[in-house]
Amino acid sequence: MTTHASTELPLDGVKVIDFGQYIAGPAVAMVLADFGATVIRVEIPGGPLWESPANATLNRNKKIVTLDLKTDEGMDQVRQLIAEADILVESFRPGTMARMGLDFAEMRKTRPELITLSIPGFASNDELRREWRAYESVIAASSGVFTDMGLNRVLMGINPSFSPLPLASAYGTMLAASSVVLALQSRERTGYGDQIEVPLASAVMEGLSYNSIKIDDYPDRYKTQRELEIERRRIEGLPMNVSYDELQELLDPFYRSYKCKDGRMFYVVCPSHKDHAKRCLKKLGIYDELVEEGLTEEEDTYLPMSEWKNDVSLGVYPLPKEWADKIAERMKEVFLTRTSKEWERIFGRGKFPGAPQRWLQEWIHDDHAETAGLMIEVEDPEFGTMTQPGPMVWLEESGEEMLEPRAREWVDFDTALASLRDRPTVVPDPVPEDEKTGWLDGVRILDLCNVIAGPHSVAYLARFGAEVIKLDPAKPFYDCWNTVIFSMTHGSGKRSVLADMKSPEGREVFEKLVKSVDVIVWNATDAQVQSVGLDRDNLAKLNPDAIFCKMDCFGGVRRGPRSNYLGYDDLVQATTGIMLRFGGSMEMPEEHAHVGTIDVMCGFGGSLGVATALYQKLKTGRVGRPRTSLAALSGLAQIPYCYDYERRGLFDEPAGREFNGYDALTRFYYTSSDRFILLSAYEHDVPKLASVEGLEGFEDVAPEDRDAFLANAFYQARASDWAERLQAADVGGTICENIESLRYYNSRPADGTPGIDRGSYSFSVHEDHPSGHTVTQLDPFAIRPVRGKVYALAPTEKFGASTRAVMQELGYPNEKIDQMLQSGFISESWSKEFLPS
């Protein structure tokens, strides 16, 4: 019998069997292992299907046993392992495990406490796509990722645009890992496990939910210069052929890169907050002169623009072009006077967001990344001392232990089985159930978050039955582009309260809310947390049982030089090399322009932290403080490249706008129907390709001539024909879809269901949305449990709409509420219109 080491990690004692291949399945098991679960990876003879040094990261903290599941002995051995497990993870096409003789549904009939997770490329109820060979790039192309890569690529005429970031797997990992742990904590209350499916196509759509929302009669005030230019060119029939330099002049001055004295580009992200833009201009020394020239600040930017006193207000996005150009020209001149490192310190200490552009290799060896535990060292048996991404989510009390993971270890079957039997499973007796319940039914959450990552995290938890109260200031700090537009996505299912926490009366409301909830979530730095009394000691005085989850930009397990620097998604893209990978050079950085690319991933990470803390509390009674950060999740977004070791060669992975695939077998091809097809194949697929109509003789083509052969062949037929032919031959290939068409063909009138029965894509049309606009948005559908219930969420209510009702629930009489409203300590609205025009 083996003996386990003493640990405070929250998933200690949880036993997992990892059947996953490629990224998402192994990554989920890695996250569980990082949290202390005992993970046995069942490897197939010959090793993993994806050969990459990244497997060293994906399989850390795991014992790997090779079993041949095509033999009776192998099947007997794997069943013995499964009999000892709490959680099973697989990532094959729907039905594959059952065809192998490992039917999860049948297993749960005799073991209802078992939790199973399937992560197929497309949903099992997607009649069209479920049997497709769903490689990462196929999922991305089918889900509109490559065709909707952002306004920049549309204007430059680079559409579709290939991205090497495995977004589907990254979003899928966080969604799937959080779902498993949510089911685990539910099991502690009910005695039941669950059977869960998380299709990667649905996961990536959830990651792009801020891109796919459609608001009818969208007010012009929110349209950027780039959007207006796209409209103009389409109306006038002009080509999309804007150069990179021309494009820069269409960007907001507080949302772009500037060249510094050292030649490095520095990314500024200061739009929307009433103080950030002003602080920026003051530190640059140009605020006063711009004010003298007429730059103004409206007292109330939530009024319709027709009621503004002036035509511009600092701190509102987007700025009118005249002022955007004027401010940008001054900022260009000033940035050339200092190095990027100097500017980083000035912005960080001045409490407004900005960061130098860096390559991934620089980030991997960055002082802050190393000091904070965002990059760690692991002694791998194959690669030696290896730098890997650190923990992506952690609890403050046990995070330090996660900084020293064990390297992957190959073991024999007996050792693997013994490590599972060493940890007996203890599950509560099942509670009789009359109907399906949500994993978080009865859990009450206070949402103190802003922008995207934090509020999205809480909105995700709401679908499982959590009651959410969102608390915001009585008067807004951010403009309505940031608050109202984004909240149309992440405000669903929440009640909104507005109170001035800086006043004694508003503080009292805040403290009463804190005392009334089980979980508090805030995206803030340590300094901000301490300033409002949510640090460990002060929170213990208010509500010792509350779980406090914190998200920030640059935080890690340990403090680092930039831990208290403010930041957004875009700054992490700049800091970790994503923008330089996308743009291709230091001179031409580009944002990976899906709104909230890292934000949403981080939000799902925060939800995982909350789920883990809830499980730990139920299991041990310990109240944990979950944490994650945008920087911590950037490692998952770049996991195929985010590592280093002594013998590694050049960091020369795909980069730049001209990159349209990895090689002739995986890239875009133009077809006769004026649409692009994505081919996604490997060398072993060459005989299959040669059997496809129109590709006869391909196996005899020299590798250097494949591009020309395939380009000519694909131009001879329509994209839809090629998609059918490739899929019939079991070769990865699909039409490059766009989000607009996916939304159009997969929308229905909102009917109170979450969409999990509608295949890989599902949208609801809310014609009676509280905003007064017809709003079409993605359903909460990527997590598909069999036992647990997923709720369709109510549309986002107007900010402050629930202030009075919640105050009454807290015990305030109407007379007191009226008095506090009149004094401005609380508010029932920021504006007359839901979406200010």
Image (cartoon, helix red, strand yellow):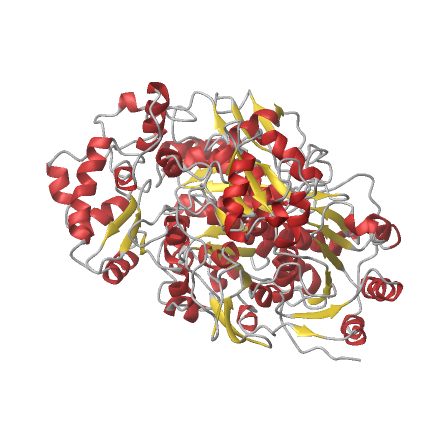
Please say whether residue 726 is visible from this viewpoint: yes
Q: Which image quarter: residue 391?
A: bottom right
**Above-or-below relation of 778 to 701:** above
Side (left or right) of 74 relative to 682: right
Q: Residue at x 42, y 42 (%)?
A: 593
**Above-or-below relation of 171 to 407:** above
- Identify which residue, 27 or 373, lies in the foreground: 27
x and y percentages locating residue 746 in the rendered image: 62, 28
Q: Which image quarter: residue 78?
A: bottom right
Side (left or right) of 740 relative to 291: right
Please say whether residue 459 is visible from this viewpoint: no
- Identify which residue, 597 or 656, lies in the foreground: 656
Side (left or right) of 534 relative to 778: left
Q: Residue at x 11, y 35 (%)?
A: 293
**Above-or-below relation of 53 to 777:** below
**Above-or-below relation of 454 to 833:** below
- Identify which residue, 620 or 207, lies in the foreground: 207
x and y percentages locating residue 651 in the rendered image: 43, 63
Q: Which image quarter: residue 238?
A: top left
x and y percentages locating residue 140 in the rendered image: 55, 42
Side (left or right) of 762 relative to 674: right
Quadrant location of the N terminus in the rendered image: bottom right
Quadrant location of the C terminus in the rendered image: top left
Numbered circles on residues, count: 0
x and y percentages locating residue 641 in the rendered image: 49, 60
